[in-house]
Amino acid sequence: SQQGEEDPQALSIQEGENATMNCSYKTSINNLQWYRQNSGRGLVHLILIRSNEREKHSGRLRVTLDTSKKSSSLLITASRAADTASYFCATENYGQNFVFGPGTRLSVLP
Amino acid sequence: EAGVAQSPRYKIIEKRQSVAFWCNPISGHATLYWYQQILGQGPKLLIQFQNNGVVDDSQLPKDRFSAERLKGVDSTLKIQPAKLEDSAVYLCASSFIPSGQGHPSYEQYFGPGTRLTVT
């Protein structure tokens, strides 16, 4: 069964704009992670947010987590063409039951 | 630090044939994962090892898929016999997660994957 569901499925923006993608999940989690996948390559870890955290920053990335709504958002500020990729959220519970969502395909146009 | 290694990178087989994939995780990473990623979808966990023991194989189609990690380091995933719907990218990942209960989780490091086409 699908745990994480990203929204939107696809997003197209201009370079320099901000990109926001959302992830909703169904059951309790220990943490939520965001990954990036460039076309034809493996996934790269971006950020991990634990269930007792509400917001986390890493460079141009900002992640929020609302456990009451079972949702998370990933914000990429000042986007660049190199940010073009698919972004996945992954939920897990104490090192088990890893479930990835279907992903958001982001296109950043120059 | 060397990353997760996988081979082969590409494989084309006919249905009903068998195929094997190999993965060598990052040195010191006790946890190893195999994922199946069908085009346009997110990765689906097939099996998770902690050292040479299986933690989760609930989504592994055990009638045709098998995996082993005999010495707790590298791992092989086998499909026998293959079906058309097995066409996908097979990703291996590793993570440093200490043994025990209630531990915090760590990021997973992914290999480049093996693209399997079944004709």
Image (cartoon, grey):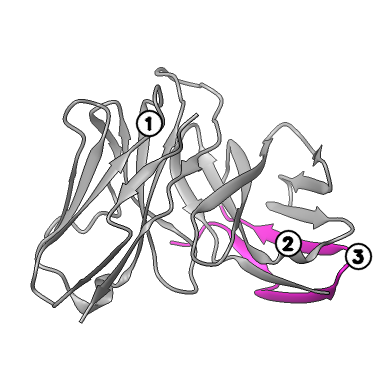
- Please state which amino acid type lies under the numbered disc 2: Ala
- State the residue at coordinates (79%, 46%): A64
Looking at the rendering, the stretch of residues picked out in magenta corresponds to A1-26
Give the vertical position of B107 relative to A109 (above or below). above
Residue at image mark 3: A16
Residue B93 position (above or below residue B13): above
Q: Say what secondary structure mark 3 lies in.
A: loop
Q: Chain of mark 1?
A: B
Mark 1 lies on residue: B31
Label 2 and label 3: CA atoms lie apart by 12 Å
Q: Nearer the viewer, residue B62 or B92?
A: B92
Residue B76: % across, % down: 21, 45
| Left or right: residue A12 compared with residue A23 | right
Mark found first going from the N terminus, 2 or 3 = 3
Q: Nearer the viewer, mark 1 or mark 3?
A: 3
* Number of other residues with Cα within 10 Å of mark 2, as a class: few under 14, some 14 to 19, many 20 or more: few
Q: Mark 2 sits on what residue?
A: A82
Q: Residue furthest bottom?
A: B119
Q: Residue at x 91, y 65 (%)?
A: A16
Which residue is at a point 81% across and 56% down the rendered structure image? A76
SS under mark 2? helix
Q: Nearer the viewer, residue B10 or A76?
A: B10
Residue B75, position in %: x, y? 24, 39
Callouts 1 and 2 on one subunit:
no
Q: Is residue B33 left or right of residue B54?
A: right
- Residue A24 lies in magenta, yes or no? yes
Type of the residue with mark 3: Gly
Query: Which amino acid lies under the numbered mark 1 shown in the image of this protein?
Result: Thr
Locate residue A15, reporting x and y percent. Answer: 86, 69
Q: Which dot, 1 or 2, sits closer to the camera?
A: 2
Query: Circles 2 and 3: CB distance less than 8 Å?
Result: no
In three-dimensional space, the C-alpha distance between marks 1 and 2, rounded to whole angstroms, equals 31 Å
